């Protein structure tokens, strides 16, 4: 038995599965240029999962006997155990994870291992593995996004009474609650989850049974295979199934948008933690210092997230470019989908993990936010709306308020520094009750419509989000 296994191992190692067609061995340069096992080895569990399903389907079709089916399945399970425990020894000629697994299976169970690939091409095998892998990865990604949302909601709840300047064009605009500002990112992340789930729904279609491009000559029950692998549907066109990777582009797009949202938050944390703003204090454990300047505390984590966003964008463009003008059906160009896709997934996962912990430990500087609300005529819109309530058309009230703002800036005042008499020189519609409107609390609490920054609305939304994310 041992001698037979050695002969079989030598036979498998002696060449490529397609050697019968060629007069020359593959050039060593080509070997190194085309190998992908270092990248696609992460697919091993999904490759074995798909192979077991394919083996059982061949058994159902009576292409394999019940005994052969059991032997192959046991052999595949043994290979997976070796890979799980990091005892699997890759051979120098292992081109990819798929051939490495088949090689080891054949070493373990003999020539019977060669029957596993009956009715299957690496084209539909790889398409299957990638879909199985992405299903699991996207499930984990949704969990990560949800945990990040929970942390943001908790941070908003802990600081729900704090007001801050809201900004447009990075200029102070109107007062809002700090919690309201933070919850904006929670809404963005919820849409990110929706995009991830949508992408998962569209890729969750079973391609195995498509063969190299035309289908298979064996009576395999594709719906049976799909059931074993928990796919709700099978692909309807074999050429499309093996040649397209639009699902990877859709995933990369969703990843890019999520990274963009992390990058926007990172930019604000960088600005807010500067000495000029001092709105927040980043945890020391998530910052670095300077090799030269002893006083420095650098926001390296959000800076890196901001920088890595461009990297993920690049992977999206990479995938789009790889598929651009690619003729049907399969082409080896598609081997390049995995480095881009895997790195994009890894980058977003790592960014979410570190940003979740950073935000969990973020400290909010209430005094700095309070100081930022002073001056700058932040309540000008409240004065304009007050005049509208007194019967002044908005365009006219806007002009009146603009002149008051100009006068305040010229004198180094804020709106509330004017006396009633001085305000009435701009409009006789202004009366004593105006000063009750010109407070940060009043400005915030008047925004009571759905989606507004009023305290009651924000607290209500926090409760809704806590229920949603629980």
Image (tube, rainbow, N blue to C red):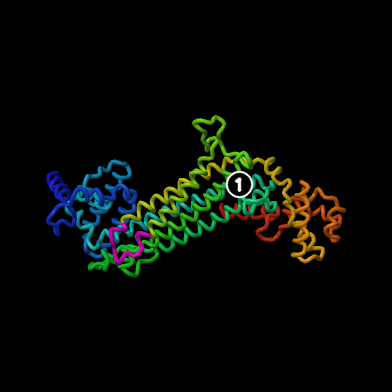
Q: Is residue 189 left or right of residue 415?
A: left
Q: Is 41 above or below relative to 69?
A: above
171 or 212: which is nearer to us? 171
Residue stretch in magenta = 321-334
Q: Residues within 10 Å of mark 1 (few under 14, many from 20)?
A: some
Q: Is residue 263 left or right of residue 116?
A: right
Which residue position is annotated with label 1?
Answer: 154
What residue do we see at 26% from left, 68% from top? 214
The x and y percentages for residue 376 are 72, 49
The x and y percentages for residue 444 are 72, 53
Looking at the image, the residue that sits furthest to the bottom is: 236
How many labels sit on residues?
Answer: 1
283 or 297: which is nearer to us? 297
- Tag 1 secondary structure: helix
**Residue 146 seen in this snapshot:** no
What residue do we see at 57% from left, 31% from top? 295
| Residue 325 inside the magenta-drawn segment | yes
The x and y percentages for residue 84 are 33, 44
**Residue 384 seen in this snapshot:** yes
Q: Quadrant of residue 276?
A: top right
| Residue 127 inside the magenta-drawn segment | no
Q: Quadrant of residue 453?
A: bottom right
């Amino acid at each position: 038995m041992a001698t037979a296994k050695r002969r079989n191992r030598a036979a498998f190692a002696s060449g490529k599965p397609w050697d019968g067609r060629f007069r020359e061995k593959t050039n060593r340069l080509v070997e190194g240029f085309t190998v992908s096992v270092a990248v696609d080895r992460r697919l091993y569990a999904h490759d074995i999962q798909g192979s077991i399903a394919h083996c059982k389907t061949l058994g159902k079709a009576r292409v394999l006997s019940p005994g052969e089916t059991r032997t192959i399945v046991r052999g595949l399970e043994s290979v997976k155990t070796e890979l799980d425990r990091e005892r699997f020894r890759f051979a120098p000629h292992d081109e990819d994870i798929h051939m490495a697994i088949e090689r080891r299976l054949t070493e373990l169970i003999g020539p019977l291992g060669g029957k596993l690939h009956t009715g299957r091409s690496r084209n539909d095998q790889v398409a299957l593995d990638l879909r199985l892998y992405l299903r699991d990865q996207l499930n984990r990604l949704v969990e990560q996004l949800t945990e990040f949302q929970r942390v943001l909601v908790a941070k908003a709840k802990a600081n729900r009474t704090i007001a801050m300047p809201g900004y447009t064009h990075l200029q102070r605009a109107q007062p809002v609650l700090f919690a309201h500002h933070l919850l904006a990112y929670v809404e963005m992340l919820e849409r990110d989850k929706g995009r991830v789930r949508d992408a998962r729904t569209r890729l969750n279609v079973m391609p195995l049974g498509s063969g190299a491009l035309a289908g298979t000559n064996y009576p395999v029950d594709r719906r049976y295979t799909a059931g074993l692998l928990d796919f709700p549907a099978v692909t309807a066109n074999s050429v499309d199934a093996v040649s397209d990777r639009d699902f990877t582009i859709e995933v990369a797009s969703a990843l890019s948008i999520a990274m963009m949202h992390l990058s926007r938050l990172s930019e604000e944390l960088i600005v807010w933690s500067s000495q000029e703003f001092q709105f927040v204090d980043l945890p020391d454990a998530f910052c670095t210092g300077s090799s030269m300047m002893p006083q420095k505390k650098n926001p390296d984590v959000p800076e890196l997230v901001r920088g890595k966003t461009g990297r993920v964008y690049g992977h999206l463009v990479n995938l789009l470019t790889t598929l651009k003008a690619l003729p049907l059906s399969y082409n080896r160009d598609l081997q390049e989908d995995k480095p881009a896709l895997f790195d994009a997934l890894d980058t977003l996962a790592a960014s979410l993990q570190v940003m979740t912990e950073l935000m969990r430990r973020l400290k909010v500087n209430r005094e700095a936010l309070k100081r930022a609300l002073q001056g700058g005529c932040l309540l000008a819109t409240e004065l304009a709306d007050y005049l509208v309530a007194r019967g002044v058309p908005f365009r006219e009230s806007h002009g009146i308020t603009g002149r008051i703002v100009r006068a305040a800036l010229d004198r180094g005042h804020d709106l509330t520094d004017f006396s009633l008499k001085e305000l009435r020189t701009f409009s006789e519609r202004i009366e004593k009750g105006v000063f009750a409107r010109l407070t940060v609390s009043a400005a915030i609490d008047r925004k009571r419509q759905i989606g507004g920054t009023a305290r009651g609305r924000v607290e209500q939304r926090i409760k809704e989000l806590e229920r949603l994310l629980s």
